Image (cartoon, grey):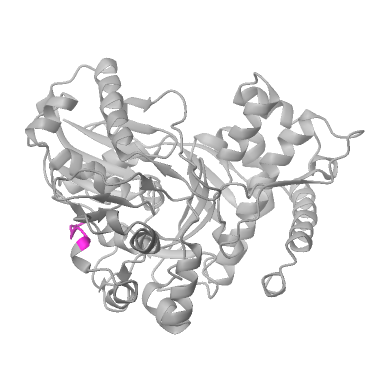
Amino acid sequence: MYFIGYDIGSSSIKAALLDAESGKCLASAISPSREMPMQVLHAGWAEQDPESWWQEVINATKILQQQVAFEPATVKGIGIAYQMHGLVCVDKNQEVLRPAIIWCDSRAVEIGRQAFNKLGEQYCLSHLLNSPGNFTASKLRWVKENEPHVFERIHKVMLPGDFIGMKLTGKACTTASGLSEGTFWDFTAQGIAVDLLNHYDIDASLLSEIVPTFGDQGSLTATAAATLGLAAGTPVTYRAGDQPNNAFSLNVLQPGEAATTAGTSGVVYAVTDQHAYDHQSRVNTFVHVNNQAGGVRNGVLMCLNGTGIANSWLKSVVGELSYPEMNELAATAPIGAAGLQVFPFGNGAERILSNMRVGATVNQLDFNLHSREHMLRAVQEGIVFGLNYGMDIMAEMGSAIHRVRAGQANMFLSPLFREAFANTANVVIELYNTDGAQGAARGAAVGAGHFTLQNAFHGMECLAVIEPQAKLQSQYREAYGQWLYALKQRLSLGELADNK
């Protein structure tokens, strides 16, 4: 018996085949081999073709089938994880009307800011736990204002994972967790955020049917099954945004537990049983995967857009170095990179900077002192320092983090990155042999009733524990303090600086 999980990222699509008996991942696939492109028509925009995600799901499934020979009927459930906050618009024939406006697109920042001012801080923070900001609802309003010919043809709007679910099942549906990430969810009313939709003049009928995070979400159509080489009727039994799913994949389900990931963007995600919010919405709160009546479980999420994408950009300009070679060279430079500082804010509006688009910069570059090694280290340290800045905000909200779990992937493959993270933030890092696609497969097993939340993680192993070291911690904290001082000076942060 097997379960398949898909992780719909903005860089690639990942797939995993989970053996139900052992709890082990038998096969994994990534497609395409190179990062998927983003369409950037204007500064601050970022779009992708949803049909390209579907094509890569097809390709990734074929790779799984090449790695392990399994009968289609032995797959008992499919789970979906996906890049959060995106907007997909389809017509009555389930045809895509325009490219998806994805998570790092900044065009709707001002629309969200105006909605926050008009609806008021009290409503937005107590009901949405966030400013409408640059989230999916504000992106939909942008379409209404700027592309009325598209808006009038919309039958349903959905998140990226909802779109893949629709391609699999023919059914347009979503979850409460998904609606919360788009600011379509009212935490007070425990239902659709009607007041925000009314303000945006958006009919609630455009939203998809709400289904449980774990459970029946439709089944493979004959067409989808034939395309994928799977069995018609195979149920889709789980879906979640990539960060709630990353937390689930690491068994982060209870208050006080935290997960982190450092892919294209970097996230720290802490579970709470409170309806917590940041007054400036620099850190956001969404419904967690195991939220239920009488047992509040929310995820407090800080996001740094410029994470793996910053390291990837550097790789493209330093020559033909592999990531392991980059990591080794970076480690030869001293902590603090001899004063060289990188601010990795070059991937759209940064929520932790109050949705400002400030761009990435290099500070205190000395042509006589700094080498490639210093730059390689400064980028990794700059990413860590940006994540720590967001964790400071989380601590102010009551979500201080002392131990965090991560999959051994992406930036966490770098020993230097792990060292810098643990010692700057003064946290213990636990690394596990899992990823988002495996998490989605485990979620599918829970949704199908084969696993419970209590036994869903057998087969998962802790590979390493990284603890802060007093000597290194003092050096990293000193470097972070200098970085933070320079950030405040550069941005002339005013009130934001005072809050730090």
Provide residue 239's location: percent of width, then percent of height: 26, 48
From the viewer's perspective, tell me whether residue 209 is left or right of residue 376.
Answer: left
Q: Residue at x 24, y 19 (%)?
A: 65
**27 relative to 259, above or below:** above
Q: Is residue 389 magenta?
A: no
| Location of the N terminus (image quadrant) | top left
Farthest right residue in view: 368
Query: Which of the 4 image quadrants contains residue 177?
Result: bottom left
Farthest front residue in view: 149
Asked if one can make out residue 426 in the rendered structure from this viewpoint, the answer is: no
User: How many marks do you count on the picture?
Assistant: 0
Asked if one can make out residue 348 in the rendered structure from this viewpoint, the answer is: yes
Which residues lie in the magenta part? 206-212
Provide residue 430's location: percent of width, then percent of height: 52, 44
Query: Which of the 4 image quadrants contains residue 166?
Result: top left
Q: Residue at x 44, y 77 (%)?
A: 125
